[in-house]
Image (cartoon, helix red, strand yellow):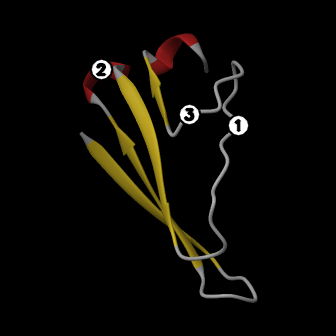
Amino acid sequence: MVQQNVVVPSANPPLSVSIEYGRCGSYVCAMPSGGCPPYSYSWIGGSTQACVSDWRRVQ
């Protein structure tokens, strides 16, 4: 597993997003916090869920 953190400043508390990658492209998840929930997702390939399985197919 590999994890990457991203911070996006905003008018409210900053939006932080942790990105988690599964082994061998098995999945990728975006885990936001702060900002203005509810959060929405839009992945290449059309998924709107927080996690995408078999990431290699949607790149």
Pointer 2 or 1: first along the chain: 2
Q: Is residue 54 above or below residue 36?
A: above
Q: Which residue is mark 2?
A: 24
Q: Secondary structure at mark 1?
A: loop
Pointer 1 or 3: first along the chain: 1
Task: Report the disc number at residue 49.
Answer: 3
Task: Report the disc number at residue 31.
Answer: none
The residue under the point 63% across, 59% down is: 38
Tell me the distance, in whole angstroms, between the alpha carbons under discs 2 and 1: 22 Å
Lateral position of residue 12 relative to residue 49, left or right: right
Neighbourhood count class around disc 2 (C-alpha, 10 Å): few under 14, some 14–19, many 20 upward: few
Pointer 3 or 2: first along the chain: 2
Q: Secondary structure at mark 3?
A: loop
Q: Is residue 34 above or below residue 40?
A: below
Residue lying farthest right? 11
The answer to which image quadrant residue 29 occupies is top left
Mark nearer the viewer, 2 or 1: 1
Quarter of the figure that contains the C terminus: top right
Mark nearer the viewer, 3 or 2: 3
Q: Which residue is mark 1?
A: 42
Q: Is residue 25 above or below residue 5?
A: above
Q: Position of residue 27 (x, y in %)?
A: 38, 26
The residue under the point 54% across, 76% down is: 34
The residue under the point 69% across, 18% down is: 45
Amino acid bearing label 1: Ser
Amino acid bearing label 2: Cys
